Amino acid sequence: MGRPGKTYQYRNWDDDVIFTKHQEASIPPGFIWLHTNLIYRFASTIVYGLCIGFATIYCRLFLHVTFRNKRCLRTQGKKGAFIFANHTQPLGDVFIPMLAALPRRAYTVAEAANLGIPIVGKMLTMGGALILPAKLSQMIQFQRAMTVRLKQHQRVFIYPEAHVWPYYTGIRPFPNGAFHYPVSANVASYAMTATYQQRRGFAKPRMIIYFDGPFYPDLTLPRKVRQEKLHDEVRQAMVVRSRQSNVQYAKYQRRPDASQ
């Protein structure tokens, strides 16, 4: 977690500045992306409900989360959608999508390393995590699971910056690879931008999250260009919203030996 005055050093924009135990966890043999077992699905419903309760308490009381312009998500209609967000909370970013997705269910694309988190890692998929495959042979199952969730009109959350930078107030450069998904499915994308703003009388800022969109693939363009344009539109919306941050709770410095 970030704290007042804490300084993180980095070499490149895609550096991981937080290191935890079990970070090298990988996808175990026989891993299932789309569960059809009724007992598992029942247990998943219970776990997800408990997560919503925890998310409400943690995000509202500890992170002081407020949503702005969430009504724009109504334009999603009876379809699935992708929501792209900046990655600024180690724990909060697990639970914030659950509140943001209500009344629908959130499915968040996550790295396999998260499976190594004690206790929580075993229940991630019950909480809606879509674990990124490590092998091409696993991609079919991953894609099938994502397709099913979109057909269920659910919301898929993606943190394209990949690694979490606690309380970082800018928008880091990120590749357009993740925008392959909304282009392939031809569904709406939205930007979800976390900002940090001063709380009177407190050092810890409040977290105000803005939503923008919808952004649709431009079907008049070639597929690759379509993907690039969608990336640019979503990122630009995030950059504009990030300017609402007015406090620096943690500092970031490029290491002297960093590559340019």
Image (cartoon, grey):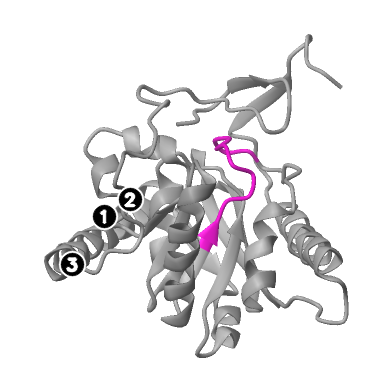
Q: Closer to us: mark 3 or mark 1?
A: 3
The numbered mark, 2 or 3, whose residue comes first in the sequence reads 3
Asked whether the residues under the numbered discs 2 and 3 touch, taking CB atoms below 8 Å apart as contact, a structural biologist would say no
Q: Main secondary structure of the magenta part?
A: loop
Above or below, comparing residue 19 to residue 224 in the picture = above
Asked whether the residues under the numbered discs 2 and 1 touch, taking CB atoms below 8 Å apart as contact, a structural biologist would say yes
* Left or right of residue 1, residue 70 in this image: right
Task: Judge the density around disc 3: few (<14), some (14-19), many (≥20) Cα neighbours within 10 Å.
Answer: few
Q: Position of residue 191 (x, y in %)?
A: 65, 64
Residue 200 visible (yes or no): no
User: Who's the residue at 72% across and 42% down the image?
Assistant: 172
User: Who's the residue at 80% across and 65% down the image?
Assistant: 233
Residue span colored magenta? 157-168
Task: Judge the density around disc 2: few (<14), some (14-19), many (≥20) Cα neighbours within 10 Å.
Answer: some
Task: Judge the density around disc 1: few (<14), some (14-19), many (≥20) Cα neighbours within 10 Å.
Answer: few
SS at mark 2 in the image: helix
Query: In what quadrant of the picture does the C terminus appear?
Result: top right
What residue does disc 3 label? Answer: 37
Going by the numbered disc 1, the residue's amino acid type is Phe
The numbered mark, 3 or 1, whose residue comes first in the sequence reads 3
* Left or right of residue 222, residue 157 in this image: left
* Left or right of residue 242, residue 39 in this image: left
- In whole angstroms, how far apart are the C-alphas of marks 3 and 1? 26 Å
SS at mark 3 in the image: loop
Check if residue 41 falls in the magenta segment: no
What residue does disc 1 label? Answer: 54
Q: Position of residue 239 (x, y in %)?
A: 77, 54
- In whole angstroms, how far apart are the C-alphas of marks 2 and 3? 31 Å
Check if residue 161 falls in the magenta segment: yes
Going by the numbered disc 3, the residue's amino acid type is Asn
What residue does disc 2 label? Answer: 58
Above or below, comparing residue 109 to residue 120 in the picture = below
